[in-house]
Image (cartoon, rainbow, N blue to C red):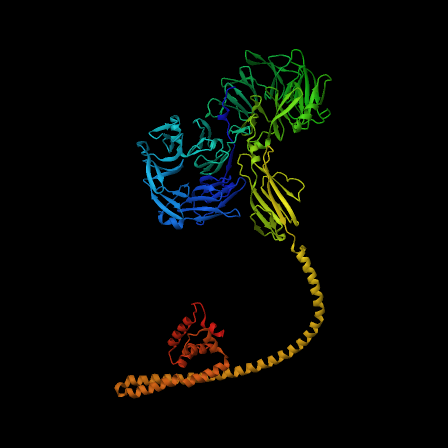
């Protein structure tokens, strides 16, 4: 059977939507860290994936990210819309952003966006379409570009730029020089520049294919692909560590070529990608492909040495059977019979006409493909399908051991006999004497037909010599050796009839004409004695299928050897169709497994690449110590034992395992000193241990895969300290407290007596103080009245003098020179002298100090810049006088009082909201 399986097989693809990673839909760039972490430039910030969980880091200004470059897992550069900077990891594991905008913003245009980042030793280049900013030694150096520049790539040890209409330029420091200029680049957009053979360059253009520069001239790479590249618009190019070339397009996903330029795979929305627009490509240390998409993130596992390649085939339904015939692969599904040319890697599956509806069984007999169909039996030759029987439901067809070249088929209702004539199958007749729903049939060396019912029991049928009539039958069900009717099927192993029961295997003892347990196989098959389907492969190989796993065995005489085992959970995203599992053996160790949404190519000769899981250990990503109020504090464990305070003796840890494949990884934990065995396998990498007693523990965590391969163990030593009340120091404290308590108790009686005496004395003192305070209050009230009276007298006197001054002033204005200035000035001077009389102030000050003890001295100490007039103002305000009442005391107008109060506030340092009266009343 000549066919190219490489082109047919679809590698395993994991789709991560925004619901999975918890960020924006668009992802513009991707970069792999050295320790296996993956980083994505997302619309909402920087995405980090550790193989188990996602974490989103927002930029301070919450702008979009366009590019990411992981130098290592502790230093990641990012850039985007008017933003450039780097992230550094704290000891706790979190990333902290450091923006370079303070250095670079002076060079930003209005809508500057930085789309590429390249690092060269200690230089980091941030590229926008019109300029490059070089970051070195905490400084930014701008370089203007010779034209619109769409791409910047580091090729070998030089930084190359793709300038539209011009060609390729080299950037060295801040200097730009041309490398490749050619008329070819006129009107073309360069999308990537990659190192090619020796010193050559591979240059990808958006719509004009890929060219190679050999140092002298440009030459088209794969000219036959140029129409495809033109139609689907190239956007990204990336060489994986193994040398494979990944080309990303805007319209049709990616294509992958090997080192020789041969197409390996093509991925788009029809075979697994979430979206066809590729915005970023990166490869990890295992040569897996990571895609930043216009809608989501996709992961393509290229680690294909596990012997499984799943081909997802949309829109054909559940696959029940498969066959290779005339260099085509045929798939019988519940929607029809589909075929694809194996010689054409780009071919799609097409429906074979007249085969719609359920197809149960495909088998190559002679020069024809025989199809057991819902409406009968079909033969296919040269792509054409014709019915040779209309008996509904062709389940299984077997060659009659008693009549070579003759075949017997089971259907929904009866058994049918066929014969092969010149390589073509011809229906002979319906076998009479028996009618039932038979799923599987086998014919032993005696010519007995063993038929397993679709739902219940096994029949043994004996035919007449013409093989057209059942002459006797036996039924084996609940009352037989099986002890039940359900889950009974019949197959052949090394020409012996074997019955599966999902519990153990049975066989037919022809010497005694009875059914007995198949002891030899039951002793050597292990868990596979629970298989419910057995399929013969060439060279004494057999596929055993159970609900939990699929195994390929070599069985020859007394030798029973397991070649390889596949867990059925491996296919959970494209599962097997329960109770209708099927495999097409291709060679002794290769086969095609039928799935609900496609097929899987199995190669048991390949070793499990995932055994390399044993070279890695889970990484501790987070450790929290939690108290009884569920308050957590994060810890950063070192190389020594972690000391845990007893008050935070509940521990929660989270691990990652960045050993990427399309298969799930399970985690197990074992806490030495507490656990008796490893925990059950869990997809969650978070473990919590509550209220650990004081002592030393060792926490061990390992990862396992579906194949039961195990990783190295991550060990963490924990020392939970004793509670403070159990320490030696605490016990010494208890003794000291006991002694002190005894002494204190003896002294308590004496203190109690003294206390009574003191209370009596204090009571008498309080009475004296109350009496003294009462007298003081009376005295203060008296002084306050005197102060108020004297103040009002001064106010009235000054009001009179002010009125008198105003009247004299009016007289002067009316009489003019008839009122001599000499007399006018003399009267005004005497009035002013009496208004600001020093004797009045002394009387006021004396009465004020008696009523408000120490007020003027205290406020003078706090505000030494106050003048005598300021102190008078403070005293009047302390008496709660209004501005109208204060004006005659100071001999000024009300407006003058307000101005004085304003100056006083400034000297006291009061703000607009502070109240001057409240401050003065505090003294």
The reply to whether residue 518 is in sight is no
Asked where in the image residue 369 lies, by quadrant, the reply is top right
Residue 594 x %, y %: 56, 26
Number of residue marks: 0
The reply to whether residue 363 is in sight is yes
Residue 269 x %, y %: 47, 33
Left or right, residue 103 beside residue 690 = left
Asked where in the image residue 563 lies, by quadrant, the reply is top right
Between 562 and 738, the one lying in front of the other is 738
Residue extending farthest to the left is 817
In this rendering, is residue 211 above or below 722? Answer: above
Residue 576 x %, y %: 58, 29
Left or right, residue 886 beside residue 642 = left
Asked where in the image residue 253 lies, by quadrant, the reply is top left
Between 496 and 720, the one lying in front of the other is 720
Left or right, residue 707 beside residue 192 = right
Residue 615 x %, y %: 56, 35
Between 108 and 571, the one lying in front of the other is 108
């Amino acid at each position: 059977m000549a066919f190219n399986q490489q082109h047919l097989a679809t590698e395993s693809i994991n789709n991560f939507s925004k619901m999975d990673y918890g960020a924006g839909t668009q992802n513009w760039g991707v970069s792999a860290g050295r320790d296996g972490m993956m980083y994505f430039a997302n619309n909402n910030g920087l995405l980090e994936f550790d193989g188990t969980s996602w974490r989103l880091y927002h930029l301070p200004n919450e702008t979009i990210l366009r590019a990411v470059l992981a130098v290592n897992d502790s230093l990641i550069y990012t850039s985007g819309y008017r933003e450039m900077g780097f992230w550094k990891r704290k000891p706790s594991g979190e990333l902290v952003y450091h923006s370079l905008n303070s250095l670079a913003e002076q060079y930003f245009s209005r809508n500057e966006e930085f789309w590429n980042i390249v690092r060269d030793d200690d230089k980091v280049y941030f590229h926008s379409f019109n300029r490059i900013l070089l970051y070195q030694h905490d400084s930014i150096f701008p370089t203007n570009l010779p034209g619109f520049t769409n791409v910047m790539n580091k090729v070998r040890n030089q930084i190359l730029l793709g300038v539209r209409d011009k060609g390729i330029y080299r950037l060295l420091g801040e200097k730009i020089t041309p490398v490749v200029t050619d008329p070819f680049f006129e009107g073309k957009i360069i999308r990537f520049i990659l190192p090619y053979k020796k010193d050559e360059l591979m240059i990808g253009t958006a719509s004009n294919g890929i060219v190679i520069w050999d140092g002298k001239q440009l030459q088209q790479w794969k000219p036959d692909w140029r129409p495809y590249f033109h139609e689907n618009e190239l956007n990204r190019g990336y060489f994986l560590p193994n040398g494979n070339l990944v080309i990303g397009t805007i319209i049709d996903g990616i294509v992958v070529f090997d080192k020789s330029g041969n197409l390996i795979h093509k991925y788009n929305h029809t075979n697994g990608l979430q979206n066809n627009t590729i915005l970023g490509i990166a490869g990890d240390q295992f040569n897996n492909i990571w895609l930043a998409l216009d809608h989501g993130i996709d992961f393509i596992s290229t680690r294909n040495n596990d012997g499984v390649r799943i081909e997802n085939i949309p829109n054909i339904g559940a696959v029940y059977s498969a066959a290779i015939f005339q260099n085509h692969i045929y798939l019988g599904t519940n929607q029809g019979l589909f075929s694809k040319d194996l010689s054409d890697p780009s071919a799609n599956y097409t429906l074979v006409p007249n085969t719609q509806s359920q197809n149960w069984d495909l088998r190559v007999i002679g020069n024809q493909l025989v199809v057991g169909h819902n409406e009968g039996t079909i033969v296919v030759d040269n792509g054409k399908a014709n019915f040779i029987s209309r008996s509904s439901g062709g389940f299984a067809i077997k060659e009659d051991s008693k009549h070579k070249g003759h075949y017997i088929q089971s259907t929904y209702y009866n058994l049918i006999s066929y014969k092969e004539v010149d390589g073509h199958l011809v229906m002979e007749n319906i076998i009479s004497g028996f009618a039932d729903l038979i799923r599987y049939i086998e014919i032993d060396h005696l010519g007995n037909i063993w038929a397993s019912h679709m739902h219940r029991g096994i029949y043994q049928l004996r035919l007449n010599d013409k093989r057209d009539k059942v002459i006797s039958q036996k039924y084996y069900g609940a009352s037989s050796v099986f002890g039940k009717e359900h889950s009974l099927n019949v197959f052949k192993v090394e020409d012996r009839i074997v019955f599966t029961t999902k519990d153990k295997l049975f066989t037919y003892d022809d010497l005694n004409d009875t059914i007995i347990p198949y002891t030899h196989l039951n002793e050597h098959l292990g868990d596979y004695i629970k298989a419910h389907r057995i399929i013969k492969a060439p060279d004494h190989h057999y596929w055993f299928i159970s609900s939990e796993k699929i195994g390929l065995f070599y069985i020859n005489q007394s030798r029973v050897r397991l070649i390889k085992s596949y867990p059925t959970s491996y296919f959970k995203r494209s599962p097997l169709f329960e109770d209708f599992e099927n495999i097409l053996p291709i060679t002794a160790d290769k086969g095609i497994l039928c799935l609900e949404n496609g097929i899987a190519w199995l190669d048991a000769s390949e070793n499990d690449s995932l055994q390399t899981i044993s070279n890695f250990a889970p990484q501790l990503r987070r450790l929290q110590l939690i108290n009884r109020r569920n308050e957590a504090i994060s810890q950063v464990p070192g190389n020594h034992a972690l000391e845990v305070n007893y008050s935070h003796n509940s521990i929660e840890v989270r691990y990652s395992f960045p050993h990427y494949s399309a298969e799930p990884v399970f985690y197990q934990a074992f806490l030495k000193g507490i656990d008796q065995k490893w925990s059950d396998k869990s997809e969650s990498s978070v473990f919590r241990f509550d209220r650990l007693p004081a002592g030393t523990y060792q926490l061990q965590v390992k990862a396992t895969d579906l194949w039961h391969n195990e990783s190295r163990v991550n060990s963490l030593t924990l020392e939970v300290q004793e509670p403070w009340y159990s320490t030696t120091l605490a016990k010494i404290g208890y003794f000291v407290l006991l002694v002190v308590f005894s002494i204190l108790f003896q002294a308590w009686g004496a203190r109690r007596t003294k206390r009574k005496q003191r209370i009596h004395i204090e009571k008498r003192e309080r009475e004296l103080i109350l009496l003294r305070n009462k007298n003081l209050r009376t005295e203060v009230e008296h002084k306050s009245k005197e102060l108020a009276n004297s103040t009002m007298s001064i106010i009235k006197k000054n009001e009179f003098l002010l009125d008198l001054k105003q009247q004299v002033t009016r007289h002067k204005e009316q009489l003019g020179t008839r009122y001599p200035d000499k007399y006018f000035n003399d009267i005004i001077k005497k009035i002013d002298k009496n208004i600001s009389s020093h004797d009045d102030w002394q009387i006021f000050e004396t009465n004020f100090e008696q009523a408000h003890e120490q007020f003027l001295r205290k406020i003078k100490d706090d505000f030494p810049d106050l003048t005598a007039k300021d102190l008078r103002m403070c005293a009047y305000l302390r008496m709660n006088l209004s501005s109208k009442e204060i004006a005659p005391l100071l001999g000024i107008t009300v407006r003058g009082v307000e101005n004085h109060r304003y100056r006083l506030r400034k000297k006291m340092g009061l703000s607009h909201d502070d109240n001057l009266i409240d401050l003065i009343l505090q003294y």
